[in-house]
Amino acid sequence: MGDWIVGGIVLTVYAAIIYILIRRHQKQKSVCARCLSIQETPSWIKDYKNEGLK
Amino acid sequence: MSQQENYSKKAQELASLVLKQETRFNLNTSDKFDIWLTHPIFGLIAFALVMWSVFSLSQIWIGPWLSDLLVGQLEILAELITSIVESYEVSPLWSGLLTEGIIGGFIAVIGFLPLIMVLLFFLQLLEDSGYMARVALVFNHYFSHLGLSGASIIPMYIGTACSIPAIMSTKTIKDERQRHMTIMLTPFVPCGAKLPVIALLLSVFFFEQAYMTLLVYALAVLVIYLSGLGLKYVFNPSSKSHQMLVIELPEYKTPSLVLAFNSMIERAKEFIKNAATIIVLMNGIIWLSANFNFQFQMVESAQESMLYFISSPIAFLLIPLGFGFWGFAAAALSGFVAKEEVVGALAVIFVFSISSDFDVIGIDRAREALAGIGGLTSLSALSFLAFNLFTPPCFAAIGAMKSQLKSNKWLLFAVGYQLLVGYVVAMIIYQVGTLLFTKQLAQGWWASILVLLIGIVNIFYARRKVAAHG
C-alpha cells in the first residue's frame, strides 16, 4: 500500500516536472526563457544596445 | 590656406576652447567622483572594496542568517515526510527517490537561495545608484589590451546574471572576430547559476572568509584577461574596426529599496522554479543511477552503480586536478544541464545537506562528506570550483553560442577552448598549490605538462587556420 502511495506521488511529481519543462521548451524554443525573463536590462545598456542595432 | 581649411582650423580652436571651459567650470559632484571611480587603477581598487563589502554582507552576515531560517523550516518538513514514509515501510526505491533524490537535492540547492537573494539585492542597489556603468568604463580600459572593443563589456556585464542573454547581446558587435572572441569569453563570467557552487565550496572549505569570494571573482577577471590574450593571438582582431564604448553615464542617485527588493523577488522566483523542475529531475536521475546497476537492481556499494561506470573514466582524467573521485566527475557532468545542479548532485551522491545549523553542524557535515569520502582538500576544492566555473557553460548557453557563432566548426573550437581553459586553470591551482604548500609534486604532474603542450599546439594550429581562411 505504502509503495503505491509514495510511488504514485514520486511519479506524479516527475510527470508534472516533465510536462512543465516540455511546455517551457515549446514556448522558449532554443533560448532560455528563465534568463530572458529575469534579465532586467539597465537603461544605460538598453540605450547602448538600441544605438548599436541602428 | 583655403577658406575651408581656415574655417576648419577656427572650428577646432573653438571646440578646444569650449572643452577646456567645460572641464574648468562645469565639474559637478558626480563628475568629481567619476574622475576617481572611472580611473583605470583607483576605479579597480574602489570596485574591489565595494564588492568585498557586498560579499561580506551576503555571504557572512545576512545571507547565512536567512539561510538558517529557510532551511530550518524545510528540514522540519523533510523530517516529517521521511518519518511518514518510514512508518509505511515503503520500498528503498520509492523512499530513497523521494527523501534523498527529490527532497534532499532540492533543499541542498534552495539552501543557498537567501545568500544569492541578498547578493542580488545589493548588486541591484549598486546598479540603480549608477555605479555599475562606471565599472564598465573601468574594464573598458583593460579590454582594449585584448583587441576587444568597449562593445564587449556589455555582454560580459549581462553575463553576471546569465550567459544566454549575454551571448545573444553580442549581435551589436560589428567586427566578426571581436564578436567571436566575446562569445567565447562571456561564459567565463560567473553567472547566477554558478553562485550556489561558489557558496557551497567556499562556505565548506573557507568558512566566513569573504575575501575568498572576492578572490574567485578576481580569478574570473584574470582568466578572462589571459584567455582573451590567447584568443587575441588566434584571431588577431583588426584594430581598424575598433568600436568605441560611448555610453551616457547616468547621474548618481539614491537607489530605490523597493526596486531592488522587487528585482530580488523576481530572480528568487525564477531560481525556485528552476530548482523545483530541472534540478529535482536531475537529482532523481542521479539518485537512480547512483543506486542501481545496468540490470536495474539496487546496489549495495556505489562502485557497482551505473553512475560509477559512467563517471569513472572521466574521473581518471581529473586526477591531475586533485579531485579524481567519481562523484566529482558525475557532479561536474551534471553541471552541463544547469550549473546549480553541481550542488544538487554533490548532495545526492555524498548524502549531505546544509542543515538548519548553517553556521556549524551543516558545514561540518558537508565537509566530512566531501573530504572524508571524496578526499577533497581546501586546495582541490578550489580547483574543483575553478573547473566548474571555467569549463563550458550549460547546454542552453552552448545553444546560444551556436546560434551566434553560426558555425559548427567555431562552436567546436569555442567549447574545446573553454574546456582547455577550465582544465588548465584547475590544474594550475592544484599542481602549483601542492608544490608551494607541500614542496612535493602532485599526482599526475606529468599529465599536466602534456595537457599544457597539447593546448599550446592547438592554439598555434588554430591561429594558422584562422590566418589561412582570412
Image (cartoon, rainbow, N blue to C red):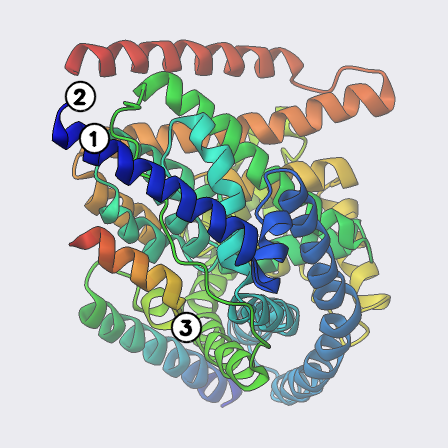
Residue B130 position within the rendered picture, expressed as x and y whole percent measured from the top left: 52, 65
Where on the picture, by quarter, is residue B343?
bottom right
Count of numbered badges drawn on the protein? 3
> Label 3 is found on which chain of the structure?
B
Q: Where does label 2 land, which residue?
A: B1
- Circle 2: is it few (<14), some (14-19), or many (20+) Cα within 10 Å? few
- Residue situated in front as seen by the camera: B309 or B322: B322
Under mark 3, the amino acid is: Thr
- Circle 1: is it few (<14), some (14-19), or many (20+) Cα within 10 Å? few
Disc 2 to disc 1: CB gap under 8 Å: yes
- Residue situated in front as seen by the camera: B104 or B226: B226
Can the viewer see residue B343? no
Q: Which mark is residue B277?
A: 3
**Mark 2 to mark 1: distance in Å?**
6 Å
Whether callout 2 and callout 3 share a subunit is answered: yes
> Looking at the image, which residue is at 43% across and 31% down?
B144
Of badges 1 and 3, the one in the foreground is 1
Q: Is residue B395 above or below residue B444?
A: below
State which quarter of the image contains the C terminus of chain B.
top left
Residue B464 position within the rendered picture, expressed as x and y whole percent measured from the top left: 27, 9
